[in-house]
Image (cartoon, grey):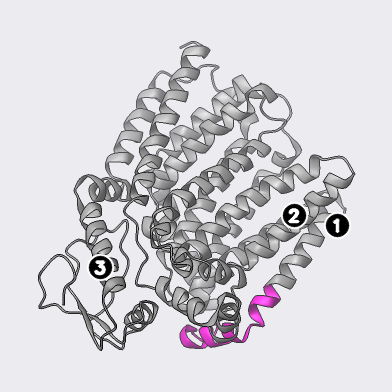
Amino acid sequence: MNHPLLARLLSFSAYGFFAIAFVPLLALSWFNHPSAADDYCFADTAVHYGFWQAQKYYYDGWTGRYFSNFLVHGSPLVWGWYNGFKLIPALMATALVWASYLFISELLHGLVPVATIRRVAALLTGTLFFLYMLLLPSVVEAFVWMASITVYTVPTALMLYWGAVLLRWYRQPSGTLHSLTGVWASVLVFLIVGCGETHMLLLISLLLAIIMYHLLFHRFIDWRLTGLLVVALVSAWLVFRAPGNAVRMSGGATSGDLVGGLVLSLKWLIRNVPGWFIKTPLLPLAIWWGVIGNTYLYKGGSLPTVFRLPLWYAALVVAGLLLATVLPSFYATQFLTLRAVNVTYAVFLFGFFYLITSQLMAFSAIARVPPSVLPTLTGLWLLSSLFNSQPMKQLYRDLLGGNAATYNREMTARHEYLVTSKPADTLRLAPLTAYPPSLFLEDVRTDPTHWWNRCQSGYYHHKTIIVDTTLRAPFPRL
């Protein structure tokens, strides 16, 4: 197989599989609606008390996640733009892809010829996103439910973008732009930490790992990273000192059992991470990247500085970062949510990509052209993974099976009913007839005192809203 044909085949495959994973998310956006879980509660608080007062209310009364609070209290519902929620999944998926592309582009400097960086970065980004969607634990919590997006997916995208900014900062010559880039990197650290504890620990762990590498192997203190670490620690203090953080933790904490949390975290990682190599075509794709990267891109030369960590240290760092994504949940509640695993899986993919790239020199012993069995093995593994991918089947089933369309019609009708109905003691809603897992998380209940019911009735200025299971019409009615 000659090089041009190989390049065209790989490009076509990468872009094709990316489209298979990305296009359904864009289509899914059209059917999205606010969730009864939290979306109306944040909106009702901001509408009734004001945007800034709502920030203070949650900081003092429930959580110290100052930036995610900022985002959820500025949702489209707050501004009366109900259909704005139809943009959220598409915007979040696009932001994650774009941040990944920027990070990979900066990471490839010095490894890939400048003329081909954009094309190679696009191919790698598309491949990683496809792998991400193949095994994504929860689509709805990654791209649809705003309360989860702001705590988990937004900071994931911000960390990838921050990585791109950091790499660019180190390559820039001294001057105004260099200083401004450093300031922007610090601002991003502040925002990431303010999203939640998972990314707080992830970011601090990463900074400590790089600082320790410089100390152990080069005997110098990296003052730029040390400065970012100080910003991260001060930002973490703002989260933990929040009165609301103590209130939230007291409601679900298990007495802060650190040892127990570590044991549960390690057990979970040992049980689950190996399966990710089997359920996705990560291994054959890694071989492709190793051979092509070694043979055609950097051509056996010396690796850029960012990839020169000893393998044992780099692997230890990746393992530590994976631990950092699950420990906060197990420490606080002894339970790991799917939205937290979304982050763990993303860190796993990028960490493995880094490890393989750092070992490109090892692939020089492999034949110049991949073995003839590799394309067949890769194709079969890809198709098998796609066929068995629950997230992908769920997406296409919701879209093509009509569940998303039915859900959209019923939620639209319910919204119009709640808006146009005159204030009443009780408004009764018929239960939904479709619950697409890619879009739906929670609904209001039959109990009028339930938190979701109270938030939604307050937002629409009604005294009580309940679901009446005796109503069988597909749309709300009196």
Which residue is tagged 1? 223
Q: Secondary structure at mark 1?
A: helix
x, y (%) of residue 159?
62, 54
Labelled pair 1, 2 in contact (Cβ < 8 Å) = no
Which residue is tagged 3? 414
Q: Start and end of the magenta stretch? A: 236-256
**Amino acid of disc 2:** Trp
Q: Nearer the viewer, residue 115 or 431?
A: 431
Which residue is tagged 2? 184
Q: Secondary structure at mark 2?
A: helix
Q: Give the CA separation, mark 3 to mark 1.
A: 56 Å
Q: Give the CA separation, mark 1 to mark 2.
A: 16 Å
The N terminus lies in quadrant: top left
Observer-side mark, 2 or 3, equals 3
Check disc 2: other Cα within 10 Å, few if <14, some if 14-19, many if 20+. Answer: some
Q: Decide whether residue 251 is among the magenta residues.
A: yes
Q: Is residue 141 left or right of residue 233?
A: left
Q: Is residue 440 left or right of residue 169?
A: left
Residue drawn at x 37%, y 73% is 37
Label whose residue precedes the other's in the sequence (3 or 1)? 1
Labelled pair 2, 3 in contact (Cβ < 8 Å) = no
Q: Is residue 195 above or below residue 242?
A: above
Residue drawn at x 47%, y 75% is 42
x, y (%) of residue 447?
25, 86
Q: Secondary structure at mark 3?
A: helix
Q: Nearer the viewer, residue 417 or 293?
A: 417
